Image (cartoon, rainbow, N blue to C red):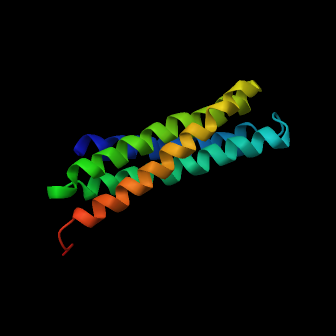
Amino acid sequence: MKKWLFLAGVSGALAVIAGAFGAHGLQGRLEPRLLASFATAAHYHLVHAAAMAIAALAARGAATSRAKAAAMLFLAGTILFSGSLYGLALSGIRAFAFVTPVGGVAFIAGWIMLALAALKLEDIP
């Protein structure tokens, strides 16, 4: 699961970059509704980068497959949910909004898989 922890770190860094870009580079360039969508994307991106790291750390023993599934779902959710909101905000193309709920479902499924992985973990020292 080193790969997932690495991806979580990269994703977290990208989320912070996106948040800073939205707050400083896009202020005054986007209408408030689109700027809010960009901020939402960056927020969920960062939260789920941390969730991916937690899943990576939970991947041991009997919990490995569920934790790996959670990490994959968090990554898919980030790409679909945050990616579609970034695309909507930067391009104004409303078709991106149709992808956003699919990413949201991936996030929910990821959290459920992480909870199921926790049930398989041995006691944490």
Residue 3 x %, y %: 26, 40
Is residue 16 placed above or below 124 in the rendered structure?
Answer: above
The one of 54 and 28 positioned closer to us in this rendering = 54
The one of 105 and 38 positioned closer to us in this rendering = 105
Is residue 18 placed above or below 114 in the rendered structure?
Answer: above
Q: Residue at x 28, y 46 (%)?
A: 68
Q: Residue at x 57, y 49 (%)?
A: 44
The one of 68 and 89 positioned closer to us in this rendering = 68
Is 8 on the left or on the right of 120, as rendered?
Answer: right
Is 10 on the left or on the right of 94, as rendered?
Answer: left
Is 39 on the left or on the right of 65, as rendered?
Answer: right
Is 120 on the left or on the right of 20, as rendered?
Answer: left
Quarter the C terminus occupies: bottom left
Tell me where residue 24 sits by quadrant: top right
Residue 76 x %, y %: 45, 37
Q: Residue at x 49, y 48 (%)?
A: 107
Residue 57 x %, y %: 27, 56
The one of 14 and 85 positioned closer to us in this rendering = 85
Tell me where residue 55 sits by quadrant: bottom left
Q: How many marks?
A: 0
Residue 62 x %, y %: 16, 57
